Image: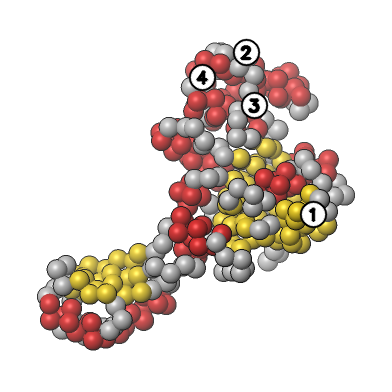
Amino acid sequence: MPTKVPAISARRIRKRYGDQHVLDGLDLSVPSGSVYALLGANGAGKTTAVKILTTLIPFDSGNITVAGHSLRDDPQNVRRRISVTGQYAAVDTLLTGTENLVLLGELNHLGRKGSRHRAEELLQQFNLTEFGGKRAGEYSGGMLRRLDIAMSLVAQPEIVFLDEPTTGLDPRSRHEMWSIVRTLTKSGVTIFLTTQYLDEADELADTIGVLNGGRLVAEGTPDELKRLVPGGHVALQFENPAQLDYATTVFPYAHKSPETLTLQIPSDGAVSSIRTILDSIDDPTVTVEKFSVHTPDLDDVFFALTAQSKIASVR
């Protein structure tokens, strides 16, 4: 079976401004039809990376392919296959929602009829049909953001770059935006997401890359990244104190809570680790009333990984 070509592949990318190395050998690979979230503190090189991948600025060395085309040798074909939605809506607030979409369609050579048809499709897809005739300046923040992303999809791009897509939105609008992102990936669109909201990356991303010092210091699924930092444990609650005491002899390094009959056993949360723990107390006289796995959240991961220079990878 042929290997699926990544939507984005970057190898040993370097970029510097004067004596400052902003990107220092960046490597990343984004699978097609997935959501890739790039996280990084201010100054980590995140914005520079996105500007390079979207052909806005050149890079000094390395190799990049986007949608199967060399970014250095064929930037025009890259631009035809991507769309960029910035942090702030690029919408003409004097035009109606329909007029904004039709204008983008005509600029993309869809023709008057094709542009109108595409506008109607997108208004329906983003639940804006009844507001299509209203000026965009009258839209709420969430509606304006939906229109902005709809405009970025007029030309049916293969890859959409979303920069801070839910900044300033209320919780309901944020969840609506998350639903839109999931729908796009189901249709085969690749999403490259930058966000300061770690819960957003946790909710949406198939893969997360943590950028620090111009390099990826970790890359993996949210669950894989959470297992990279200490603090994870398995909590077992027993039926009575005698059973808790027995389990404590098996795991003398665990934290015992007699009040709740609970034993907290350090664990990375991996299936193999959990199986080992349960096999260790495989005694018919011992009953585990409750069982739960606790792992660090992405905040813990982010702070831990950006505080260290050593590269860690789960891939």
Q: Local crowd at mark 3 within 10 Å, few (<14), some, or many (≥20)?
A: some
Q: Local crowd at mark 4 within 10 Å, few (<14), some, or many (≥20)?
A: some
Circle 3 SS class: loop
Q: Earlier in the sequence, mark 1 or mark 4?
A: 1
Q: Earlier in the sequence, mark 1 or mark 2?
A: 1
Do the numbered discs 3 and 2 sit on residues whose CB atoms are within 8 Å?
no
Kind of residue at badge 2 = Leu
Kind of residue at badge 4 = Tyr
Kind of residue at badge 1 = Asp
- Residue hosting label 4: 139
- Residue hosting label 3: 90
- Residue hosting label 2: 94
Q: Nearer the viewer, mark 1 or mark 2?
A: 1
Marking on residue 19: 1
Name which quarter of the figure residue 11 lies in.
bottom right
Q: Nearer the viewer, mark 3 or mark 1?
A: 1
Q: Is residue 31 above or below residue 247?
A: above
